[in-house]
Amino acid sequence: MPSYDPHHWTSHLFDIEGSLVREILGRVSVTVIWSAVIVVTDKLDLIPGANFEIPETAHSLIGAALGLLLVFRTNASYDRFWEGRKLWGGIVNETRNLVRQGSVWLRHEPMRLQRLILWTICYPYACRSRLRGEGGIGPATTELPPGEVADVLAAEHTPLAVAKKLTALLDEARRDGHLSDYTMIAADQNLQQLIDYIGGCERIHATPIPFAYAVHLRRALLVYCLTLPFALVAKWGWATVPATLCIAYILFGIEEIGVEIEDPFGVDENDLPLDAICAKIEATLRDLLPR
């Protein structure tokens, strides 16, 4: 995610990265070229007797409906983006809580505490990899038993496998008398929350905006933008081309923003900074490793 100061327009107003200009350039260009063809044909009377004008009122009514569709699209996408951020905020908090508790309960078991912290560090990396379809569970694997790491990496659901390792580790400590049944229950609640959070992220990732809605919105956008020159050419003349450019840029840009943020767990410029979040969790939890 690009870093910017929202109080200073000039610091980001002309940025290309993250602004989606590249993504919409093709469709905007097609619309502008089409508008130029319509204007040239009309003004130079290349097709004698042809009428390229349509009523502005009808086009305005289509624009009003299209505006409502775009508002719903961007609102729905932003809700998904913000829910994803809240879920990852929950992962941050619950990993801290788990290690905070473990660093007190297992303070006399430094080796076991170290394994607890390292496996907890692996959890957000496993979630990130799961959501991106990647492999690996983070750099902490070099400090864990290779056999256990191999078992986790071979699992179909690596976050669940990491959580299972944490549960087994805590249960082992309970059986050895280092944890009471009550503290085991409290720690298990943290692990349940971690599983719930990755489940929420998977729900967002696996459920796109309904197909019919996305297709209808795009068809409506194309109809509106490609018929726009016919509604403007009579009064705007040659100014129809730059007017079409501005309107197409705005409308296609709004639609593309919705596409960009509806699944916020990828590696696009406007996705959540999962790499930075995972690194921050690791740095915080490593500070509690036994000295």
Image (cartoon, helix red, strand yellow):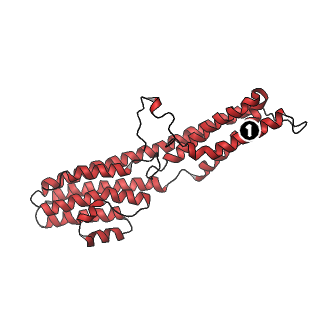
Q: Residue lying furthest left in this view?
A: 108
Q: Residue lying furthest right in this view?
A: 49
What residue sits 23% from the left and 69% below the top?
A: 145
Which is nearer the eye, 33 or 152?
33
Q: In this image, 24 relative to 244: left or right?
A: left
Whether residue 140 is situated above or below residue 243 in the rendered picture: below
Badge 1 element: helix
What residue sits 17% from the left and 67% below the top?
A: 172
* Quadrant position of residue 249: top right
User: Label 1 crowding class (10 Å Cα cut-off): few <14, some 14-19, many 20+?
Assistant: many
Q: In this image, 103 relative to 164: left or right?
A: left
Q: Residue lying furthest top in this view?
A: 235
Whether residue 268 is situated above or below residue 169 in the rendered picture: above
Which is nearer the eye, 254 or 56?
254
Question: In the rendered view of the protein, which quadrant contains the N terminus?
Answer: top left
Question: In the rendered view of the protein, which quadrant contains the C terminus?
Answer: bottom left
Q: Residue 61 location, x and y as percent? A: 69, 33
Q: Residue 30 location, x and y as percent? A: 69, 44
Q: In this image, 154 relative to 13: left or right?
A: left
Q: Residue 94 location, x and y as percent? A: 27, 51
What residue sits 74% from the left and 42% below the top?
A: 34
Which is nearer the eye, 134 or 3?
3
Residue type at mark 1: give it. Ser
Q: Residue 203 location, x and y as percent? A: 44, 55
Whether residue 131 is situated above or below residue 218 in the rendered picture: below
Q: In this image, 249 relative to 164: left or right?
A: right
Query: Which residue was labeled with disc 1?
Result: 35
* Quadrant position of residue 247: top right
